[in-house]
Image (cartoon, rainbow, N blue to C red):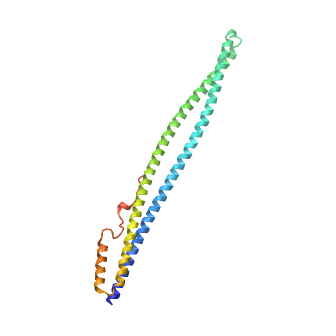
Amino acid sequence: AREAANEETITKMKADFVRDITEQKNFYENMINDQIRLLEQNHLEEKQKYLVTTQDLKQKFEEEKKQMTANMKDLKATILIIENEKAAEVQNVRSQKIRLEALSDELAENQILFDEKNSQIEKLQERVSLLEKESESQNKVIQRLNQKSGILSKDIEQEKDHRKTAELRLKAFEAMVEAMSNEIYDPKKLEKNALAMLAFFKSPNQLLRRSKSHHITFKK
């Protein structure tokens, strides 16, 4: 009866140890996988938003710049024509008075258009400045994501080391259990193995412990 009880105790201890190792292994694998997926998803979304916004603003800037250049060229040509016509018509002021008034009105309208284009240029410059600030902000976000990725990589390597240690401990435990099973009918050897197993469980690295240092957290 005592031998059967010892066998049952050993079997239960082995099952409890294996279950605990398995639970901790699954816990850390799930936690790390969740953090990796979240980090990759956020990084991809931020990168895509930045690329789309940058491309749209760049394209719009080039289109507006091209249109504005053409308009300014036309406006300068119009002003030059008007000035030449005014100089040519000075000798015949009376006959060309109506024409000069019309040209003056046209010049005024062109001046308004010119002022509007200048205002558009200023607004465009403001938009470019805003885009540069947004680009700088996105670069900072990417830098933070890279830093978080580095931290996560270190934590993953640490968890791999812990897992390897736990597997080695499990193999050692299984070897001890097997030795006890082979010598269960020798009380002295059985007692010796039991003391060795007790020392094994009292060792500092008997199990992977769930500590706050193993949790991976990110600040936005």
- Residue for point 38% across, 69% down: 166
Q: Pick whichever, 94 or 80, lies toward us.
A: 80
Q: Is residue 204 above or below residue 45?
A: below
Q: Quadrant of the N terminus?
A: bottom left
Q: Residue furthest top?
A: 91
Instruction: Answer whether residue 109 is visible to the viewer in this image.
Output: no
- Residue for point 62% across, 22% down: 108
Q: Is residue 40 above or below residue 107?
A: below
Measured as percent of width and height from the top left, residue 60 is found at 59, 39
Q: Residue furthest right?
A: 95
Measured as percent of width and height from the top left, residue 44 is found at 52, 52
- Residue for point 49% across, 42% down: 135
- Residue for point 37% across, 75% down: 17
Residue 155: quadrant of the picture: bottom left
Q: Is residue 17 above or below residue 87?
A: below
Left or right of 28, for residue 200:
left
Left or right of 25, for residue 190:
left
Q: Pick whichever, 203 or 63, lies toward us.
A: 203
Left or right of 79, for residue 159:
left
Q: Pick whichever, 201 or 37, lies toward us.
A: 201
Residue 20: quadrant of the picture: bottom left
Measured as percent of width and height from the top left, residue 96 is found at 70, 13
